[in-house]
Amino acid sequence: MHHELENIVVGLDVGTAKICVVVGKHIFGTVEIIGVGQCLSSGLQKGFVIDIERTASAIRKAVDEAELMSGCAISNSVVGIADRFIHAQNTSGMITLTSHEVLAGDVQRVIESAQSIALHDDRKILHTILQEFIVDTHHRIEHPVGIRGTRLEARVHLITAGTASINNIVKACKKAALEATEIVLQPLASAEAVLMPEEREMGVVMIDIGCGTTDVALFTSGTLRHTAVIPVAGSHLTGDLAVGLHITLSEAERLKCLYGCCQKEIHNETSSVEVFASNGIKSSIITEKSIRMILQARVTELFAIVAKELELSGFKNDLVAGVVITGGSSLLPGIDRLAEQVLDMPVRLGKPLNMEGLAENFCKPQYSTGIGLVLKAATAGVTPVARPTSLFEAAKLQFTRLREYF
Ligand SMILES: Nc1ncnc2c1ncn2[C@@H]1O[C@H](COP(=O)(O)OP(=O)(O)OP(=O)(O)O)[C@@H](O)[C@H]1O
Ligand SMILES: [Mg+2]
């Protein structure tokens, strides 16, 4: 408990398979990971908290572990969210410049106008991410204040979440004596951890395949264009194996992680493994081929859904840097090759990029979100630097804070 608190940032990934707390030390623009705590998660269904009590106790365990490892007392954290109640859309707002020049207040007004979509009580705006300002016919303006013109337009990516989803997560944190200072869409965090700035500039889609959901974030020209949360992921693979092979879920999970593979061509076509049948008495012999066939079918289906999502985004042809896959289910051997075939794009596997202080143990795809949340927490508090995305993010943050004020 001896670190200076203002330098310590914390991210909490509330996942369907595991709860993970990452502690970072933020000094001179770099973030050093000084602690990680985790606990198996059982209070969520496809990213949605269905059991606050259980989720709270798992959060507490993970926080305790992270406190022990980092030597910090943790009282608040940036928290991730991703479930099927997330909606995202690109919207724009436009205002007339009465003084024929953009004033500071105009920027706020135009963003507000872009945010004015019909919103029911059961939804809340989670992020308003600026894509560009347009003054008259001039596009891609980053700092509109002071520019002369008659019309200011703001294009934003607006992400909304279910009020219940947010409330449940905040409640679970509170029960675990943790204050959720900011809620961040999980794929934005994962993207922060695994993507290179050049990839975002060239056009890339990040796919985080977890246990309950597959989270998508698409960038072109360095800007976020499309996000989606697909409620199909690792737990479906396990479920399919259990049903298809007549085995228990825990046996299916074990087989998946030990023998799972989605490669088309494989040498050991006939090799077999012994499994425990779901009645718990008899054991039976199944071939590795049957495991592979089942997994391949479901993963192919998943990437077909992703392909549709990319079509829908309208940016499919702009993804020069292709696809980056991360999340625990990206550990399935051959998943990148299968994605390449289905999506017809170059694919690479992603894990947290060269983080300082990060032990080898945590440099794995299942920690992308947790580490990304720490990075988000670090950038939220500081004055923005050169990168346009962080500038926009900072503007958004200032704006959100202002709104809360009034
Ligand atoms: N070696 C492996 N092969 C295949 N799948 C694996 C392997 N290791 C872990 N997984 C799967 O990864 C999933 C967990 O991934 P992750 O930790 O990213 O999920 P999560 O963040 O808790 O869940 P979500 O983000 O969906 O809420 C589980 O479904 C697990 O079965
Ligand atoms: Mg996850």
Image: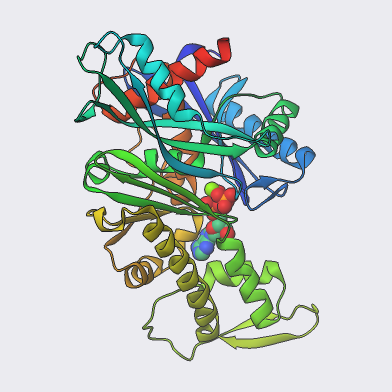
Say which residue appears at 48% left-offset and 43% top-offset: 88
Asked if residue 19 lies left or right of residue 28, the reply is right
Q: Position of residue 103 (x, y in %)?
A: 31, 9
Q: Position of residue 149 (x, y in %)?
A: 21, 17
Q: Quadrant of residue 250?
A: bottom right
Q: Quadrant of residue 107?
A: top left
User: Could one spot residue 320 in this view of the protein?
Assistant: yes
Say which residue appears at 48% left-offset and 29% top-offset: 115
Q: Position of residue 399 (x, y in %)?
A: 45, 17
Q: Which of these two is toward me, 334 or 221?
A: 221
Quadrant location, the N terminus: top right
Quadrant location, the C terminus: top right
Q: Which of these two is toward me, 267 or 380?
A: 380
User: Could one spot residue 22 in this view of the protein?
Assistant: no
Asked if residue 18 lies left or right of residue 96, the reply is right
Q: Which of these two is toward me, 121 or 180?
A: 121
Q: Is residue 76 above or below residue 370?
A: above
Say which residue appears at 46% left-offset and 25% top-offset: 377
Image quadrant, ligand 1: bottom right
Q: Is residue 349 above or below residue 58?
A: below
